Image (cartoon, rainbow, N blue to C red):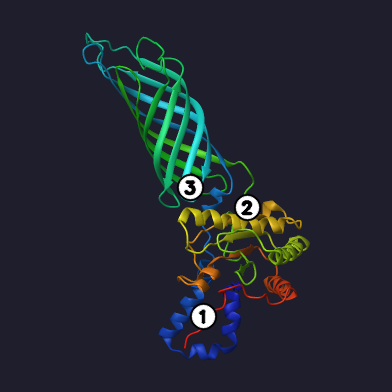
Amino acid sequence: MHFLIDCKNLMSIIAPDMKHFMGLGFHRLVLVTMVLATCRVRAQEVVTIDPYDHMRQTPWVFIGTDLGYGFLSTNPLTELTKHGVHGDFKGLFSNYWRKWVVDTGAGWMVNWLAGGSDNSVLTDDKVTTLAALLELSGRYRLTQNWEVGLQNQLFLGTDTTFSTTGAENEHVSYFLGPQVAYTIASRNPWRLTGAFWTDVNVPNRQLYLFMLGIQWGLPVKPIVRALFERSYEDPIVIVSFDLDTIHFEFDKHVLSPRSKDILWALGEFLAHESKSWRYLRIEGHADNRGSDEYNQQLSERRAMAVKQAIVEKGVMEERIEVIGYGESRPKIPEDSEYAWAKNRRVELIFDRVKDPKKFKKAIDEIRERFGQPELFPYTKKPTTE
């Protein structure tokens, strides 16, 4: 178990021997002052909270609009090339994973294109297109903010040939192109997008669209608010359960009977003392055997199994956030049976704890109530000569 303290606690340790620190000399005193000034930041860094992890808690509904420039290449013998404005309004259903985002949605688009000369003998009639649209896009998450991928849109309805005759295309018009998105995480996130589309099947002409967009998101299900409301003053208690306490066999996410008993006891305590803490973040971890994708899913299932056991004893599900880190955050970065066993773990991070000392003591008592568990195979630390 790890317990984070803030600067006031550190000062209480230093204050009784302040005379000694005053005698360190100017340079050393400056160093001590810098340590004190940054201690909260250091403590916070121990708990690496990704503010974008909440995007994976639930599907999202995004409402947005695109606006941009359109260029229509036509038959040069009969019609002028055209350019103008293209825009749309749409709703999207978005699913976030650790490395991918998939959007599906629908909306309405409008397109105004005009020729370049009223004196030309070529046809320069304006083209106005109104159509319903369907969208499917997939993006790879390069960083917490940046995503890149492909965007597909289908236009259905009036004048999907983008011609001056108003004729309807026998097939829907299909547009495809690269897309870049920048996500601003908040309780209701914003997305800024840029895209370049071109048509795939519009007959006798080629349409190019350069688009910029903005979208605003709403969660489908309630999400844990701790990620947005955390401050350096908030007491945090971290509880780490490795194989010696909560047992996950290799390649499994099923809890042993003894592990369930411990978590049920913890759930009863959390339900009874529900006012002593605000939020709980359950993090699942796996060892580095197996593929990244498989270990990611396995760690999420392990964290979910722990959550389910705690919720069964009356803890509100809305106060618990679950996330899996796969093999990305090993406790011991080694390849050995001992390291693998320690890395197959679940960590519980409690936020807004009213009395951290009392809270920590109560959880220690739960551990003691079940006694020191019999160590599972290979969980003993190897000794050296």
> x, y percentage for residue 20?
52, 91
In the rendered structure, find residue 212 and report the number of the disc placed on it: none
Q: Pointer 2: what residue?
A: 224
Query: In the picture, which quadrant includes the N terminus?
Result: bottom right
Q: Pointer 3: what residue?
A: 184
Q: Amino acid at mark 1?
A: Pro
Asked if residue 309 lies left or right of residue 219, the reply is right
Q: Quadrant of residue 208?
A: top left
Say if 187 sits above or below 154 in the image: below
Q: Amino acid at mark 3?
A: Ile
Give the secondary structure at mark 3.
strand
Seen from the viewer's position, the closer of residues 25 and 353 is 353
Q: CA distance from mark 3 to mark 1?
A: 46 Å
Q: Pointer 1: what residue?
A: 382
Asked if residue 49 lies left or right of residue 277, the reply is left
> x, y percentage for residue 2?
59, 73
Say if 351 sits above or below 159 in the image: below
Give the secondary structure at mark 2.
loop
Q: Residue at x 39, y 16 (%)?
A: 128
First in residue order: circle 3 vs circle 1: 3
